[in-house]
């Protein structure tokens, strides 16, 4: 199985997770979006030398992965392209900060070391929080939540179309790769001289498909905005979920409760 087919298979599995019935999947998308944004804002607001508070913020991830019946290992595996970049930013940080901060077991921890751990945890936690959102909320519900906050409809429409055309473009690229391998069975990979023609053909085919899809949408009455799922009402458990996490974030960020751990 090619890498393109593997990637499409992973996206299909993610869509299957979004369609499951569960505690997190049943929550209002606006509540889930607000909670995720608040979590990331609180997480990045900690000073760069405070490692313990950043570590404690993993409570949110552990609880939600358990409630959503999701695997943390699968989440890390599916975000493997983003997580190394986050870690590289943290690793390069010690080279620019040699301020001694504290001593642990005879070793002096510099500001660069602490900020490296802090940056890495913040990045990894933020990526996993985003994965929790997309693993429990369909793209239609996310677009509905964005429109609820009056995000420009053209931007929301582009996000929705990118998701819907991802499979079409991926399958088209897979067919072109299979055709190339049949014509060059003994060749390992794609020769650099064929990169330009393949990308050009892929672009032309994508434009033709997009034109046909747009004509079909226009014939069906498309006027610049989709209907992003059903109109949903807030329920008492949505408010309880949001208020509970707001209180937890407030306690973790603005009280001295973390001094017991430190």
Image (cartoon, rainbow, N blue to C red):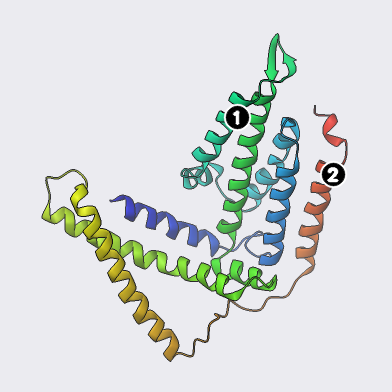
Q: Which residue position is annotated with label 1?
A: 93
Vertical position of residue 233 compared to residue 170: above or below:
below
Q: Position of residue 147 (x, y in %)?
A: 65, 73
Label 2 neighbourhood size at 10 Å, few (<14), some (14-19), many (20+)? Answer: few
What residue do we see at 55% from left, 46% from top? 71
What residue do we see at 37% from left, 75% from top? 210
Q: Is residue 173 left or right of residue 28?
A: left
Q: Is residue 161 left or right of residue 67?
A: left
Vertical position of residue 225 compared to residue 33: above or below:
below
- Tell me, yes or no, whether the two marked residues, 2 and 1, touch with CB atoms within 8 Å: no
Q: Position of residue 191 (x, y in %)?
A: 19, 47
Quarter residue 105 falls in: top right
* Sequence-first tag of 2 and 1: 1
What residue do we see at 18% from left, 43% from top? 188
- CA gap, disc 2 to disc 1? 29 Å
Label 1 neighbourhood size at 10 Å, few (<14), some (14-19), many (20+)? Answer: some
| Residue 12 visible in image | yes
Instruction: Nearest to the eye among marks 2 and 1: give it.
Output: 1
Residue sitting at the far top: 106
Secondary structure beneath disc 2?
Answer: helix
What residue do we see at 74% from left, 14% from top? 103
| Residue 28 visible in image | no
Query: Residue 123, which numbered label?
Result: none
Secondary structure beneath disc 1?
Answer: helix
The residue nearer to you, when weighing 10 against 228, is: 228
Quadrant where the C terminus is found in the figure: top right
Q: Which residue position is annotated with label 2?
A: 251
């Amino acid at each position: 199985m090619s890498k393109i087919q593997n990637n499409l298979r992973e996206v299909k599995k993610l869509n299957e997770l979004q369609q499951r019935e569960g505690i997190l999947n049943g929550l209002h998308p606006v509540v889930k979006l607000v909670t995720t944004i608040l979590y990331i804002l609180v997480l990045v607001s900690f000073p760069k030398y405070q490692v313990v508070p950043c570590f404690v913020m993993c409570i949110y991830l552990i609880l939600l992965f358990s409630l959503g019946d999701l695997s943390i290992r699968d989440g890390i595996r599916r975000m493997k392209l983003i997580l190394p970049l986050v870690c590289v930013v943290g690793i390069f940080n010690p080279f620019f900060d040699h301020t001694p901060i504290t001593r642990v077991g005879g070793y002096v921890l510099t500001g660069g070391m602490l900020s490296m751990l802090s940056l890495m945890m913040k990045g990894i936690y933020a990526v996993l929080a985003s994965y929790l959102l997309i693993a429990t909320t369909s793209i239609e519900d996310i677009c509905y939540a964005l429109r609820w906050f009056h995000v420009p409809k053209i931007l929301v429409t582009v996000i929705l179309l990118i998701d819907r055309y991802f499979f079409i473009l991926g399958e088209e690229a897979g067919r072109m790769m299979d055709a190339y391998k049949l014509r060059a069975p003994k060749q390992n990979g794609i020769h650099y001289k064929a990169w330009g023609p393949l990308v050009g053909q892929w672009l032309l085919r994508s434009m033709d498909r997009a034109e046909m899809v747009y004509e079909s949408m226009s014939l069906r009455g498309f006027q610049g905005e989709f209907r992003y799922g059903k109109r949903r009402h807030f329920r008492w458990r949505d408010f309880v979920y949001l208020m509970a996490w707001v209180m937890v974030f407030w306690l973790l960020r603005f009280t001295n409760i973390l001094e017991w751990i430190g």
